[in-house]
Amino acid sequence: MKKSAVKKIFLIAVPLIAVILIICLVAIPRLKSALNNGKDGNSEEHGKKTENTSTINKENISSAVDFDHELSTYQPKKDHYNFYFTYKTVHAWWDAVALGMEDAQRQFLDKGIVITYEYMAPDGASALDQTERLGDAAKEDYDVIGVDVADESIISPVIDKMIDSGIKVMTFSSSDAAAGCKRIAYVGNTHNYEDGADLTEELCKKLGYKGKVAILVGSVGAPCHEDRARGAKDVLAKYSDMSITAVEYDMDSVDLAYDLTKKILADNPDLDGIVCCNMSNPVGAARAIIEKNSKAVIVGMDHDREALQYLKDGVIYCLGVQDCYSMGFNTIQVAVMIADGVYPGTLYPEKSEMKTTLIFQQDAATMLETLYGDISR
């Protein structure tokens, strides 16, 4: 589903069996594609025994990504809405968000309400590109424009100008605008700093609070990536025997994360750990770790299938899985209310918080089964 622009218009009924499969969490080809941004990794030769610290039961792991949603009781004022959404970069993470959007779209259609929307992003994260896209969208007649902020210092003033001109703008998915921005509401992760801190605490505990650590951040200026890296740095600073040997930006690219990790390992062959702040870099880092036969411990973000396989095999120690599906579903619901002139209050909050679930090796098989239908043990 790697497209720069996708027009979503559901004017025909979706086969019932497809809906049932999604709701029941059984993987379908579309879901496998959307939740996987790379080929399956072969990490068996590099598998390591790890101490599984998770106390989360199978039921909670299965609900880390919630596919079972129903529209709220809110009654829309129109029978057709047209939205525009732009996000950081074409990537499987946002494809997963799109699945939740489509579910909400189908449910609105069942009520006789047609939702159409543009879902657009560049092939590489760029605040300049996002600024241009927002400028173009502002000239059109969209009910609401949604932004996954590429760089808060650049994009927040753009949003403010749009709001001042009467355009309804919200933020969604992984990155909100800067504090004080006039955007109407945000649906997404409100605790990226805490996610980075939590992952790093697990890494420190695993290493016995002693070691050299590298941080792979992601895209320069992306609030979610920068906040996670900030959380990681703050945790590492608490422990006198922990040190940061490198901080690199991989621009949310598996290949660049792989290259950067190899360079870090070449410069620091005694590296003890890596904190990965997006969905791409745990995969790139794990590939490099395997190739170089390093013992460095990896913690990172999200649900990439290859990353989950590395988690299962012990190459990755811990992953923080976000509920992308719920982000997409709730984004559409909030956009409808904003379009109707309903602002944050009793019907929905200014910030709709989505959960992140930390999972370990013993949880990987259940997560693979939940997301991809992989029942191998």
Image (spheres, grey):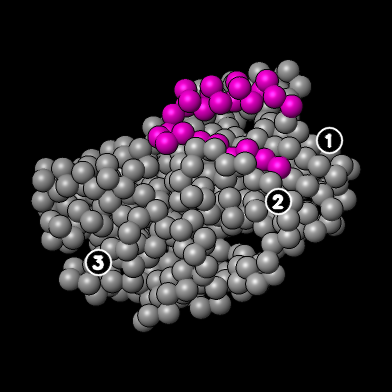
Task: Judge left or right: residue 128 versus residue 314.
Answer: right
Quickly name the residue at label 2: 10
Task: Judge left or right: residue 236 versus residue 343.
Answer: left
Quickly name the residue at label 3: 42
Q: Is residue 344 above or below residue 330?
A: above
Residue beneath the point at 59% across and 25% down: 134
Task: For mark 2, give the secondary structure.
Answer: loop
Q: Please check the rendered image and state whether residue 67 is part of the magenta-colored stretch, yes or no.
A: no
Quickly name the residue at label 1: 341
Q: Amino acid at mark 3?
A: Asn
Task: Judge left or right: residue 112 versus residue 95.
Answer: right
Give the alpha-carbon distance from disc 3 to disc 2, as whole Å: 38 Å
Q: Position of residue 129 (x, y in %)?
A: 48, 25
Residue range (magenta): 116-141
Q: Please check the rendered image and state whether residue 122 is part of the magenta-colored stretch, yes or no.
A: yes
Q: Check residue 285 in the rendering and tell me which mark sits there, or answer none.
A: none
Task: Judge left or right: residue 240 versus residue 200.
Answer: left
Mark sitting earlier along the chain (1/2): 2
Residue beneath the point at 74% across and 27% down: 141
Mark sitting earlier along the chain (3/1): 3
Report crowding for label 3: few under 14, some 14 to 19, many 20 or more residues within 10 A (C-alpha). Answer: some
Mark sitting earlier along the chain (3/2): 2
Foreground pick, 305 / 249: 305
